[in-house]
Amino acid sequence: MPKVAQGGEISVAVAGGYGVGLTMQLPRFPQPGETVTDGVLSSGHGGKGSNQAVGAARLGADVSLLTAVGEDAAGADAVAMWAEEGVDADAALRSPAATMTGFILLDAAGENSIAIAPGALDLLTVEHAEGFRSRIAAADIVLVSLEIPLAVAARVLEIATEEGVPTILNPAPARGPLPASVWRHITYLTPNRSEALTLLGGEERMPAQLADDLHRLSGSTVVMTLGGDGAIVASPDGQVPIDPVPASAVVDTTGAGDAFNAALAVALAEGAGPTAAATWAARAGSHAVAHPGVLPGLPTRTDLGELP
């Protein structure tokens, strides 16, 4: 039977990417072949796995992280940041390949476009997943995203099943339908609308139908995020819409999904049902978009208030 935290500190095991984010703020996105000037460049910590690990730690969880970074200055900066944020990254691979780098274009409306060079993340193997087993077994929930090789992500999910630990798969970035063998190891699936379309083969349909179809395909509880339109929870009990939480301002949407997933993981680990957990997670996403950069926008418990 899946474990449920019974009071006290809860534990979240995270498997996913770390990367340096190089952000260019522009008045608007360039068209192909066009140069747009007046940009403002900034850099910071990024990567879905790292962001989600930090987000869960800020919300009070005991967090362990499986990822990979280079034996370079960016990797050293990552290790120092995790120590400061209270994330156990002892399982992280230090690789001779470069630390993942993401190039983020951000327009005046706060929308983003991202390109990624995986670097060290491509050197993670299923053996590294096996080395993470003890932390998975000790966790109340396991949160996995797809910037790491699919075989590694799939093995982490499988180990969690073997250890009786519930899982969340945040299928980002989604590159296509998942192998059929992966679905049975996913307890909660958290795509956004475009990721849901990709997982289902790209055929356009309404959000409610997307969530329903993914639930039937995967057998998991689907928590599909819809940006400013909230979210949908699709489970064996039916569908529940999650109302959007208006942001005080929309400054940068880059970390909204990571803030949402971190809060969802913490809430579920504390024993909340998926609807209450998604409602709380929506607050986290709303908080994130009101801040420039990802780490500055990841909320604390004080920022979100208590679970509904």
Image (cartoon, rainbow, N blue to C red):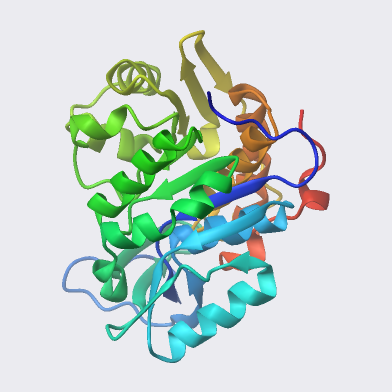
Q: Is residue 30 visible?
A: no
Q: Is residue 241 left or right of residue 70?
A: right
How many numbered dots are placed on residues in this image? 0
Nearer to me, 62 or 286: 62
For residue 219, which quarter of the picture? top left
Q: Position of residue 259 (x, y in %)?
A: 58, 51
For residue 177, which quarter of the picture? top left
Q: Is residue 150 left or right of residue 283?
A: left
* Residue at image point 64% right, 48% down: 11
Q: Position of residue 144 (x, y in %)?
A: 42, 48
Q: Residue furthest bottom?
A: 73
Up the image or down, 41 lies above or below 275; here it is below
Q: Position of residue 3 (x, y in %)?
A: 59, 31
Q: Is residue 78 left or right of residue 131?
A: right
For residue 62, which quarter of the picture? bottom right
Nearer to me, 154 or 134: 134
Q: Quadrant of the C terminus?
A: top right
Up the image or down, 71 lies above or below 186; here it is below
Up the image or down, 262 lies above or below 102; here it is above
* Residue at image point 57% right, 44% down: 260
Q: Position of residue 113 (x, y in %)?
A: 35, 61
* Residue at image point 47% right, 67% down: 91
Q: Is residue 228 visible?
A: yes
Q: Residue furthest top?
A: 237
Nearer to me, 28 or 87: 87
* Residue at image point 27% right, 75% down: 119
